Image (cartoon, coloured by chain):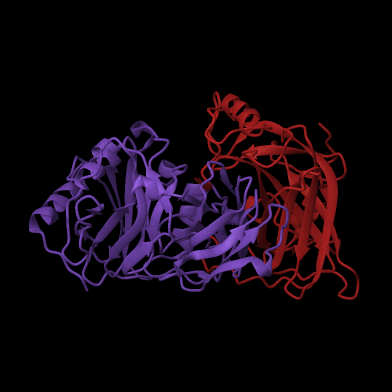
Chain colours: A red, B purple
């Protein structure tokens, strides 16, 4: 597995930030104000973005061409990859983060879009809150009803975009691959999690197919 | 308002509320206001009057065996019930009524439901209450949708000519009824009732089987520090040919401000304005869009949906501390990340939803939602 160094700068700068914009709504205390993060960087400069993934070990890793992204079972079942972003020359509040995994052959895509805030750091950048997976793109990659290749070990294009309310946007596209992991947020035993990943993420998976040792394709919905 | 007073049934419901689920009459409450279909044409099912005390949310699950419904309808019990028209009545205070076809059953040991032990009655009021198995969405995670309504009063929907949803005799179906008598919504009479008429279409008249899509975006969070969040998702319908959308509605709670659906080619990551076929800004009575053809979804395409929210203070008696406690227990969110967030869940005052219901034809057995 290709692993780059941990985003030390990100972590260090994030830990030095105040809590002026979000988080920290302690039980019983006064809740924090709505997002008040300032514009991050230079309003006259083009936006810039760096992207990172949440790994099976709970750490964040920068993403570049060739990075292997960990596939994790979320609470609702199925499998996702978690992708975060840091950026500058963009507003700090209310940005739309889109993360998308695309099959380069069919162009079919799986995506997640959600509104996030970017917390300013000491280097003039802003980042989604590290480790808070609700502000990472939760890209639902399995069950695999969309790609002719196995999701694990396959070659994909990862597209990550930040868009502000005024229409400013920045996007980064890299070539990545993915790997099944035994990590489950659904409290599935590790062996079953891994077996289930290889089953529901394989090319040709059939909806409802019994996956030895693994949960089904997840509870995010479906139909007939 | 339509009222039905059948004391015997009320007594039985009250008795059941005080104890464990047990067998009940699968067709407990025929109603003169919503006339049941004539013999040979359909069947009426219902919940009876469900007590919804002040400060409570009540979600009850009732199971019916299709072969029994066929029998009651005076139809051949060995052949499918071909659902072609749905009439559904709910009195004021309803939040939703969903009917699913039962698929994977979670074991009772894991908190699942056993259709043979229907009904499951789940009342929830206190901030720390968790509700019963009828409040646990994982219990019906892969159960295909048959019908739903979110309006008070009567829905009457006849599917397009030649379109029917085939229910096999050996299947179970579940009627789930949710009434709210709390802060954001009230049930004036303290009682909720649902009646549903299923109308049958003769086999020889069927041209297309109806398919349905039910999606829940479970990673939503509506937080004070990110007070106007949007979430986008998609559902793919695996079909070599285009499919026609004939019904759609979105579902969220009181922080929901806008719900939209678009046709999706499975390739775009932005909604296509030209493909918009559904919009709602009313969380309590969202539009139930119906028509001969609301949209045509391209082969192997699907539905792109968007949900917009506006955070607001928790309704009394709830507080941010209650929401944070729920967030910590349900999602194991660390204190530093707690932010008075409404998270995915069924309870109107403390949770949010971003769910879609779509009806289309011809049916595909290959639907995946994100």
Give the percent coordinates (x, y) of residue B307: 57, 64
Quarter where residue B171 is shown: top left
Compared with B5, B22 (above or below) is above
Q: Nearer the viewer, residue A137 or A36?
A: A137
Furthest toward the front, the residue is: B204
Give the percent coordinates (x, y) of residue B61: 30, 48
Give the percent coordinates (x, y) of residue B162: 43, 54
- Give the side of residue A63 with respect to residue B139, left or right: right
Quarter where residue A212 is shown: top right
- Give the side of residue B228 with respect to residue A41, left or right: left
Q: Is residue B2 visible?
A: yes
- Give the side of residue A135 with respect to residue B6, left or right: right
Q: Nearer the viewer, residue A186 or B159?
A: B159
Compared with B365, A51 (above or below) is below
Compared with A44, B96 (above or below) is above
Give the percent coordinates (x, y) of residue A137: 69, 53
């Amino acid at each position: 597995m290709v692993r780059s160094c941990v985003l030390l700068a990100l972590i260090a700068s994030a830990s030095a930030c105040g809590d002026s914009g979000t988080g920290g709504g302690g039980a019983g205390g006064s809740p924090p104000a709505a997002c008040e993060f300032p514009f991050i960087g230079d309003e006259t400069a083009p936006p810039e973005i760096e992207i990172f993934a949440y790994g099976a070990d709970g750490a964040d890793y920068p993403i570049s061409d060739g990075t292997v992204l960990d596939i994790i079972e979320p609470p609702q079942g199925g499998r996702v990859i978690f992708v975060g972003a840091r950026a500058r020359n963009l507003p700090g509040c209310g940005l739309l983060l889109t993360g998308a995994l695309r099959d380069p052959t069919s162009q079919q895509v799986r995506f997640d879009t959600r509104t996030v805030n970017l917390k300013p750091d000491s280097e003039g950048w802003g980042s989604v809150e590290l480790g808070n997976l609700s502000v990472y793109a939760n890209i639902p990659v399995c069950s695999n009803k969309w790609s002719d290749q196995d999701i694990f070990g396959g070659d994909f294009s990862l597209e990550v975009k930040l868009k502000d309310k005024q229409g400013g946007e920045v996007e980064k596209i890299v070539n990545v691959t993915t790997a099944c992991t035994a990590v489950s947020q659904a409290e599935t035993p590790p062996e079953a999690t891994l077996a289930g990943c290889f089953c529901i993420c394989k090319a040709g998976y059939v909806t409802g197919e019994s996956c030895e040792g693994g949960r089904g394709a997840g509870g995010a919905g479906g139909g007939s | 308002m339509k009222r039905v007073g059948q004391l015997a049934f009320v007594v039985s419901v009250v008795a059941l509320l005080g104890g464990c689920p047990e067998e009940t009459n699968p067709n407990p409450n025929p109603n003169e206001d919503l006339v049941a279909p004539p013999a040979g044409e359909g069947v009426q099912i219902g919940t009876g009057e469900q007590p919804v005390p002040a400060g409570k949310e009540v979600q009850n699950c009732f199971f019916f065996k299709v072969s029994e419904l066929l029998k009651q309808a005076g139809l051949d019990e060995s052949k499918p019930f071909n659902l072609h028209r749905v009439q559904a009545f709910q009195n004021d205070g309803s939040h939703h009524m969903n009917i699913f076809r039962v698929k994977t059953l979670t074991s009772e040991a894991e908190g699942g439901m056993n259709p043979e032990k229907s009904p499951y009655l789940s009342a929830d009021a206190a901030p720390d209450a968790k509700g019963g198995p009828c409040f646990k969405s994982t219990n019906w995670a892969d159960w295909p949708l048959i019908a739903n309504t979110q309006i008070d009063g009567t829905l009457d929907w006849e599917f397009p000519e030649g379109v029917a949803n085939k229910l096999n005799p050996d299947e179970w179906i579940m009627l789930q009824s949710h009434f709210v008598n709390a802060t954001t919504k009230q049930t004036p009479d303290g009682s909720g009732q649902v009646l549903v008429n299923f109308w049958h279409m003769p086999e020889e008249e069927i041209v297309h089987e109806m398919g349905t899509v039910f999606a829940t975006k479970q990673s939503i969070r509506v937080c004070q520090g990110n007070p106007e969040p949007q979430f986008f998702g998609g559902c793919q319908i695996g079909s070599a040919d285009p499919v026609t959308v004939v019904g759609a509605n979105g579902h969220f709670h009181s922080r929901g401000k806008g719900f939209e659906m678009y046709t999706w080619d499975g390739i775009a990551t932005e909604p296509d304005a030209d493909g918009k076929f559904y919009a709602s800004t009313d969380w309590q009575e969202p539009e139930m869009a119906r028509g001969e053809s609301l949209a045509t979804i391209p082969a192997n395409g699907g539905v792109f949906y968007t949900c917009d929210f506006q955070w607001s203070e928790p309704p009394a008696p709830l507080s941010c501390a209650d929401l944070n406690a729920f967030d910590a227990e349900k999602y194991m969110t660390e204190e530093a990340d707690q932010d008075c967030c409404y998270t995915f869940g069924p309870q109107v005052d403390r949770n949010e939803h971003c769910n879609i219901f779509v009806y289309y034809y011809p049916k595909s057995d290959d639907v995946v939602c994100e």
